[in-house]
Image (cartoon, rainbow, N blue to C red):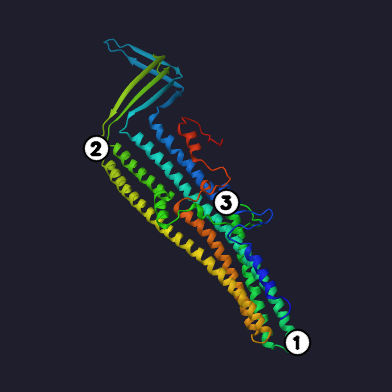
Amino acid sequence: MAGWGPSKWVRGLAVGTIACGAWPLTSLPVNADSLEGALVQAYQNNPSLNSQRALVRATDEGVPQALSGYRPKVSVNASIGQQYWDTTTRSATFAANYTQLSGNMTPNSYGVTATQTLYNGFQTANRTRQAESQVQSARETLRVAEQQVLLNAVTAYMNLLRDTATLDLQRRNVEVLQEQLRQTRDRFNVGEVTRTDVAQSESRLASGRSQVLSAEATYKASVATYRQVIGVQPGKLAPGSPVDRFSPHDLAQSIGVGTATHPSVTSAQYGVDVALQAVKVAEGALYPTLSLQGSVLQSNESSLLQLKSFNALVLGQLTVPIYQGGAEYSLIRQAKETLGQRRLDLDTARDAVRQNVVQSWGLLEAAKANIEATQAQVQASEIALNGVREEARVGQRTTLDVLNAQQELVNARVALVSAQRDRVVDSYGLMAAVGRLSPQVLGLHVPTYDAGVHYQQVRDSWAGVRTPDGR
């Protein structure tokens, strides 16, 4: 069994595997894309995340819309036209006197009307509180989207890293099998092995090439996913590291943090507030409404005898609802049922977070144990391959035994690569489960999106159609 010895073959596989190591190495590839850089790119460029940010900005506009109930409503009215008059009148006396008036006029008028609501059953105040709670809920939903995008970015990065290493392993395996086939044919030519050994080597080489094709397809799919999630084409990827230091140290603490601060839970809490204010708004329809109206009207040539008139009016109006068909009572009952539903949704959100935390914790613990198991498997497979090769040299093992040992080592190293990938992804998954997966916690060097900036820009805006970014 001259040619490629076991040590050279093992070193070839180790190169492919170590490129997907779960911990930083002493020397990283030059100009390599890092996991942190990929997260920064996804945070800045991911279209679904930018779409969610736009939705938050649209939700911000609900607050000035609600505040408009405190502000006056002013309208300007104007009219102008052309009119022809021809009238004949009879005096109310015994002697009939007739008077005829005729002529052309241009009647016109213009005026201003202003209305200010003084009291409407606190509906404006409750609508404002409701809109503010909707803004807070939208921000928490944005945090959920940020976590999902960052987790997707980590998954896409580590999947590509894993699939790159797996493809390299399979290609090196084909090189080894080609050398194995050459050596088997040489031994067959001198009568040391049979035609069966040659056929077994050929079959295993064909299987190896098929595995390379399958690994290439998986690699290309991972590249496409990377481009979709992160927004740029991947370069040479550096190893990724787990982030256990940012996660709670035990399961009970993880559950407590998750059920209290996870954005899906806080979003549901704000949803309860929104529903509560909706009940108060509906109840406000049963209260009186008090408003003040002022108007000024200038009329010109309204008739042949009246050339000009001016009218100014200040009017207070009180409306007390007595019965409006019962629709307002139905709306109140409906709002109360919606409030009950939102409270149940909050319980559902807490239960879902708890389940996700327990599941993520279990996956991470399994991934840690799997690293040790697959490392032991690789070491044992290396020793077994070396032993089988030595025994084959003295005729105690067959060619099929050597091929099987080689395949077991390849499978073990592929399993180790997958375990290293799971170790990193599951550590980020636990952070997302407890609600801590954010650029601030990870310490990413990227300007974080502050939803409060746009809110303050539009909250007290009285007029204008341009958005703060100039559109």
Q: Against 235, is 400 above or below? A: below
Res 283 → quadrant: top left
Quadrant position of the C terminus in the picture: top right
Circle 1 sits in a helix, a strand or a loop, which is it?
helix
Q: In x, y percent, where is residue 423? A: 53, 61
Residue indicated by mark 2: 323
> Quick check: 118 left or right of 402?
left
Report how far apart the C-alphas of labels 2 and 3 lie in the structure.
Answer: 59 Å
Quadrant position of the N terminus in the picture: bottom right
Q: In x, y percent, where is residue 68? A: 41, 32
Residue indicated by mark 1: 189
Residue indicated by mark 3: 39
Q: Earlier in the sequence, mark 1 or mark 3?
A: 3
Label 1, residues with CA under 10 Å away: few <14, some 14-19, many ≥20: few
Tag 1–tag 2 contact (CB < 8 Å)? no
Res 220 → quadrant: bottom right
> Quick check: 150 left or right of 296?
right
Report how far apart the C-alphas of labels 1 and 3 lie in the structure.
Answer: 57 Å
For the question of whether residue 329 can be seen, the reply is yes
Report how far apart the C-alphas of labels 1 and 2 lie in the structure.
Answer: 106 Å
Q: In x, y percent, where is residue 408? A: 59, 75
Task: Check disc 1 and give the amino acid type.
Answer: Asn
For the question of whether residue 171 can be seen, the reply is no
For discs 1 and 2, the disc positioned in front in the rendered view: 1
